[in-house]
Amino acid sequence: DSFIVDAKTEIRMPVQPSNGRAGVTIDDGTTLYGVPLETTSTIVAGPFTASDAQAAGLGGGAGVAVVTIFLVAKVVYGRSEEPERLA
């Protein structure tokens, strides 16, 4: 398939990978280009910024704080089912 998007010609063609890799050769009349194709296999694809890292750190810290407060409150208010050590 070939069509024009934003004053650029875009050509799409199926590519069959070999040994888990695939690539395309492009000839513009003067130069021959070899372009390896990559597929992402990540659960959450990037690109990530500094604010993403800050948000992840804040979320992780908040999660640890909530669990810690819960465990401390459970012990302080006597709702822990673990026996107390007497000696």
Image: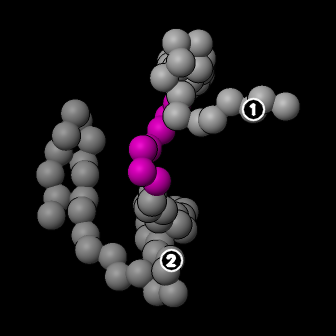
Q: Is residue 75 left or right of residue 42?
A: right
Q: Viewer-proximal residue, 84 or 2?
A: 84
Look at label 2 and name its amino acid: Arg
| Residue pointed to by mark 1 | 85
Q: Can I make out residue 52 in this image? A: no
Q: Residue furthest front?
A: 86
Distance from label 2 to label 1 (Cα)? Answer: 62 Å
Find residue 36 and report its horizontal and vertical position in percent. Answer: 52, 66
Q: Residue furthest right?
A: 87
Main secondary structure type of the part rendered in magenta: loop
Give neighbour class at mark 1: few <14, some 14-19, many 20+ (Cα, 10 Å).
few
| Residue at the image position 46 percent from the left and 53 percent from the top | 42
| Residue pointed to by mark 2 | 21
Find residue 76 and report its horizontal and vertical position in percent. Answer: 59, 12
Find residue 17 and report its horizontal and vertical position in percent. Answer: 41, 81
From what the image shows, is residue 17 above or below residue 84?
Answer: below
Marks 1 and 2: in contact by CB < 8 Å? no
Q: Element type at marker 1?
A: loop
Q: Which residues are magenta?
A: 42-50
Q: Viewer-proximal residue, 8 or 86?
A: 86
From what the image shows, is residue 35 above or below residue 58?
Answer: below
Q: Viewer-proximal residue, 83 or 5?
A: 83
N-terminal label among 2 and 1: 2
Look at label 1 and name its amino acid: Arg
| Residue at the image position 42 percent from the left and 44 percent from the top | 44
Q: Element type at marker 2?
A: loop
Q: Viewer-proximal residue, 30 or 54?
A: 54
